Image: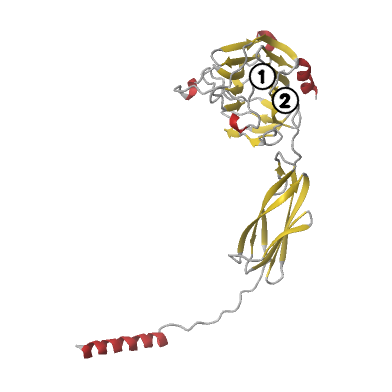
């Protein structure tokens, strides 16, 4: 038996040796691939035309680049305003590199980012991006919220971006650009994200170019949720505020409803707060709420004023702009096709003179 096993092992060894010599091609050296093209450089951030808005005058910025080459990347140099800030020479994938660098001291103003990549053959490619760190916005006295709607949905006091619902857009505004409403479209903010919390005295002011269709809509809604109610039946008016319009294609009236924590008060100017949306053009809308009274202004004139116990913000964790949704829906004051511009909130009561100054400036 031992002899048979030894014979089998000897045969297997002979077969293996034969296979090594006859059945497998020997390794052949390959000529290096010709380097035909220069690297490709992509600046992923900040891109050309980017506006960086923060509350600080000096801020860090994460620079992100991507480089590809047909053979091998030799190095990547990153320059900001002509000065080299970092270089990359060690790559996990020598044909495709994705790199980032945090530059700590970006200052206000326009900046030029330059990224140069070289390959082993000496070919180079340079990409540039011109971007700007915008000087922080300086709020007006008592101002806690400002949206200019100049091509973005950014609020400039807290530096937070609105959540978009639907597909709103931009149009020519009272100054520069304006928010342009669309069916089922509106903006929201979480009140907890604001730098300054909503106060017991509150004012808002903005430019408004009404569209008569639909014949009713929400304009500004800061309402508590109506727990247990269907989405189209929300109507909890015990706190917060609801500014809205209603009427017809030729006659719209702006109305304000305010909740004091237990009940709500109405501020309806009737005919004095009415206009023809087909001919009115831009209207300056403002209102102020204090523990003593509420006042509504159109184009700097008082259209409604009355005693008020003030406003409660209990449960008011969401701001809706250009709709009553999702918190004020029972009476179909939903999305608004109108234009909005230069929207501001204040944690104080505005006088008529201050309202007119906002309108004229």
Mark 2 or mark 1, which is nearer the start of the sequence?
2
Q: Tag 2: Cα neighbours inside 10 Å, few (<14), some, or many (≥20)?
A: some
Measured as percent of width and height from the top left, residue 306 is found at 66, 9
The residue closer to the viewer here, 273 or 103, is 103
Closest to the observer, 75 or 108: 108
Q: Residue at point 55% right, 81% down?
A: 29
Q: Quadrant of the N terminus?
A: bottom left
Spot the residue most to the left. Answer: 1
Relative height, residue 107 to residue 162 (above, below): below
The crowding category of the residue bearing disc 1, from other C-alpha atoms within 10 Å (few below 14, some 14 to 19, many at least 20), is many
**Percent of width and height locating residue 278:** 69, 18
Q: Vertical placement of 78 versus 331: above or below?
A: below
Q: Secondary structure at mark 1?
A: loop
From the top left corner, tell me how far across and down residue 262 is, in percent.
53, 14
Residue 93 in percent (x, y) is at: 58, 65
Q: In which image quadrant can residue 335 be found?
A: top right
Instruction: Tell me the quarter of the image containing the C terminus.
Output: top right
| Residue 167 appears in the picture as rendered | no
> In front here: 202 or 285?
202
Q: Is residue 105 visible?
A: yes
Q: CA distance from mark 1 to mark 2?
A: 11 Å
Q: Which residue is mark 2?
A: 142
In the picture, residue 339 is in which quadrant?
top right
The disc at residue 201 is: 1
Kindly check if marks 1 and 2 are in contact, taking CB atoms under 8 A apart as contact. no
Residue 10 placement: quadrant: bottom left
Query: Dot 2: what SS?
Result: loop
Q: Is residue 175 above or below residue 11?
A: above
């Amino acid at each position: 038996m031992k002899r048979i096993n030894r014979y089998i092992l000897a045969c297997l060894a002979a077969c293996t040796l034969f296979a090594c010599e006859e059945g497998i091609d020997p390794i052949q050296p390959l000529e290096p691939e010709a380097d035909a093209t220069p690297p490709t450089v992509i600046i992923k951030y900040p891109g050309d035309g980017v506006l960086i808005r923060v509350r600080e005058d000096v801020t860090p910025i994460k620079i992100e680049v991507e480089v590809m080459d047909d053979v091998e990347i030799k190095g990547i140099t990153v320059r900001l305003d002509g000065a080299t800030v970092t270089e990359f020479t060690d790559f996990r994938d020598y044909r495709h590199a994705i790199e980032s660098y945090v530059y700590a001291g970006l200052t206000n103003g326009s900046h030029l980012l330059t990224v140069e990549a070289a390959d082993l053959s000496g070919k180079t490619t340079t990409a540039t991006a011109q971007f700007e760190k915008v000087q922080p916005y300086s709020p007006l006295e008592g101002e806690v919220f400002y949206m200019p709607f100049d091509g973005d949905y950014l609020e400039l006091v807290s530096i937070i971006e609105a959540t978009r619902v639907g597909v709103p857009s931009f149009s020519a505004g009272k100054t520069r650009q304006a928010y342009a409403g669309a069916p089922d479209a509106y903006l929201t903010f979480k009140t907890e994200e604001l730098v300054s919390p909503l106060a017991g005295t509150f004012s808002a002011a903005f430019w408004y170019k009404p569209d008569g269709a639909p014949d009713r809509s929400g304009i500004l809604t800061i309402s508590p949720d109506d727990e247990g109610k269907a989405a189209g039946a929300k109507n909890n008016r015990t706190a917060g505020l609801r500014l809205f319009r209603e009427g017809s294609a030729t006659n719209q009236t702006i109305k304000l409803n305010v909740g004091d924590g237990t009940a709500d008060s109405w501020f309806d100017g009737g005919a004095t707060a009415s206009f023809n949306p087909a001919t009115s053009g831009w209207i300056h809308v403002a209102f102020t709420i204090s523990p003593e009274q509420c006042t509504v202004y159109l184009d700097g004139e008082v259209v409604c004023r009355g005693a008020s116990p003030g406003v409660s913000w209990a449960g008011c964790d969401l701001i809706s702009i250009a709709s009553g949704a999702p918190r004020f829906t029972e009476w179909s004051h939903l999305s608004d096709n109108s234009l909005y511009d230069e929207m501001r909130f204040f944690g104080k009561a505005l006088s008529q003179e201050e309202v007119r100054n906002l309108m004229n400036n």
